[in-house]
Amino acid sequence: MVKKIKEEKLKLGVCYYPEHWPKELWEDDFRRMKELGITYVRMGEFAWTVFEPKEGTFSFELFDQAVDKAHEFGLEVIMGTPTATPPAWLTYKYPDTLNVDQDGISFQHGARRHYNYNSENYRRLSSIIVTEMAKHYRDHPGIVGWQIDNELNCEVDVFYSEADHIAFRKWVKEKYETLDNLNQAWGTVFWNQTYTSWEQVYLTRKTVSNSPNPHHMLDEKRFISDSAISYVKLQADILREYAPNKWVTTNGMFKHLDNHKMTNELLDFFAYDSYPNFGRVIEDNSKKPLRDRKWSWNLSVVRSISPNFAIFEQQSGPGGWVTRIEQPTPKPGQLRLWTYQSIAHGADLVMYFRWRTATKGTEIYWHGINDYHNLPNRRVEEVEQVSKEIHQISEKIAGSSYQAEVALITSYDNEWDGEFDKWVGPYISKSKDAWFKAFQYKHVPVDALYVNQETTLEELKNYKVLVYPHAAIVTKEQAELFTRYVEQGGKVIFGCRSGYKDETGQTYMKAFPGYLAELAGVTVEEFTRVAPFEKVPRLKFKDSNDIEAIDFNEVLQPHGDVEVLSTFTHAHFEGKPALVRRNVGSGSCYYFGGVFNLELASLLIDEVGLNNYQDQFELPEEIELSIRHKDGNDYTFLLNYSEQPQEILLKKEYRDALSGKRVTNKITLKPYDVLVLEP
Ligand code: GAL
């Protein structure tokens, strides 16, 4: 079953922390929220000690009053389970609940997320608080749903407590059954790592030259993901038992967690926290950086989990902790733009983080829509504008689906394995960035697709074209699936380092690209990394003579009916194939022996022929195009990310869905402005 949020209208919300403010402010806050057109208020997620001031003693007074008050003003509350921030009394009494780093040093009380998922005490105490909250709020008409914990695996995504080592031992025992199987899977014969009893097995620990066994590392990530999911299950089961009729979700997308599996098995839909400002401050020396527009990729991944999703935290001001993160304020219009960025990608609910900037604690510089002074400001005005104008499109957009005929593929296995493997991991993210950028600048909407052993042909067939830049781990079954897809008319594009690893992360004793060789019609004759001091080889493709074959080159040997589309130049393998196409059935497979860059990805988009809506629009690169479709109608979002006005050409007549005016021909989109068009 597809897990998606089911709203009949687009909704807005805010994150609010009643425990941070004097009660006298609440009424005015809720009233102003209502006036602003806010529907949802999220609260509770960090307030464990308020709910349970000492072990076994529960107090709901403060939140009862806050929920009642919010409800009185017609607001609906999303309640958070407060387990991201364990109480001081808890970690003091039960130090085994604390997370530990790889060097064996415990994280301590003072920040957040310092617990581990496997401590029996933490699981027991979490069950108790969640049960008490679920029972207490089960019938409250003001509460619509639950957020479990907050941002699992954020800030820390590895766990090495005693409880984790013990749970890992159990996990590998279940997975491998015998030590012999485990030793095989981890290739422990190498460097004499063979385990002769289960007690010797730990999560990775400090090793010389920071070089733990790579297959062990891959399983460690799978284990962390399973641990987080089992912790979410613990809470979800309680919430469903004691508070049925309310939805259950969790927020955030962080490393070492299979969010697809978690959502499919346990949640009603997935919620994401969108902070595009990170894209404005992260150093990006690549050509034509996407900056805040890069967040459209994250939103696309979220959409692959839940086609219609919620943003539980939408950035609404400059972001900063006392100790880290120094971000500028959103420019006039940018807060509105980011809201539409989320909506354009499938968000039917957008909640701003946070109602008002905190006056105390680590996040006094993480600004909400209201400032400390609580006086009118530009950010609140912008939210008001959004709130007023989305009424026009609210019912039309809610529940609509994003249109894409191409998907950019990845897998958790390849991401997790690649994280530690410098011979493929960096290429995965580099090529993904290049492709996404090319799709963005060419106005070709793209989906994200995560594949695993359960992926079906039907899922692949949703797309005309698939791009799987560095499919290192590919099983025989997956290779067959891609072959069926191509035979039946699909086009698939692979890059170097594909098909050479099995599910343990060990390499096949096969010519690269392993089980994909037949489909691609090539084997790799030889390969090399491009050393930083070397001249970068080039390739000729289409009318471009001089594309850099960056980072890694595979010299391809074609077999049979394969067309060579491009050859290398400026290398000792000059003239040898770099890019080939093989037509199979009614589709084709492209194989490129390298890491993709913007230029090559752009040319390949032209080559495979994807709709970039040129019959309807002429758009500058600065504009993102997204289409949501419902009841036979396309709703086109045109988003201007630049600080310059942008000229666009509408080749047909449309209705500007936000203003209601008919529009056609030349239009100027102001800096950070947004246009939503309907037929
Ligand atoms: C999120 C988190 C919020 C707040 C915000 C700003 O990651 O869920 O609680 O910390 O970032 O830092």
Image (cartoon, helix red, strand yellow):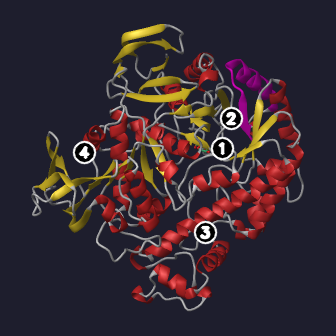
Comparing labels 3 and 2, the label whose residue is closer to the camera: 2
The CA span between labels 1 and 3 is 31 Å
The CA span between labels 1 and 2 is 9 Å
Residue 24 in magenta stretch: yes
Helix, strand, or loop for circle 1?
loop
Q: Nearer the viewer, residue 160 or 326?
A: 160
Residue that label 1 marks: 269
User: Are dots 2 and 4 in contact, CB under 8 Å?
Assistant: no
Residue that label 3 marks: 100
| Residue 136 appears left or right of 3 | right
Residue reaching furthest to the top: 661
Q: Residue at x 64, y 51 (%)?
A: 263
Q: Amino acid at mark 2?
A: Lys
**Magenta span:** 23-43
- Where 497 falls versus 377 (above or below)? below
Q: Quadrant of residue 187?
A: bottom left
User: Are dots 1 and 2 in contact, CB under 8 Å?
Assistant: yes
Q: Quadrant of residue 169?
A: bottom right
Q: Amino acid at mark 1?
A: Phe
Numbered-mark total: 4
Ranked by sequence position, the earlier of labels 3 and 2 is 2
Residue that label 2 marks: 6
Residue that label 4 marks: 600
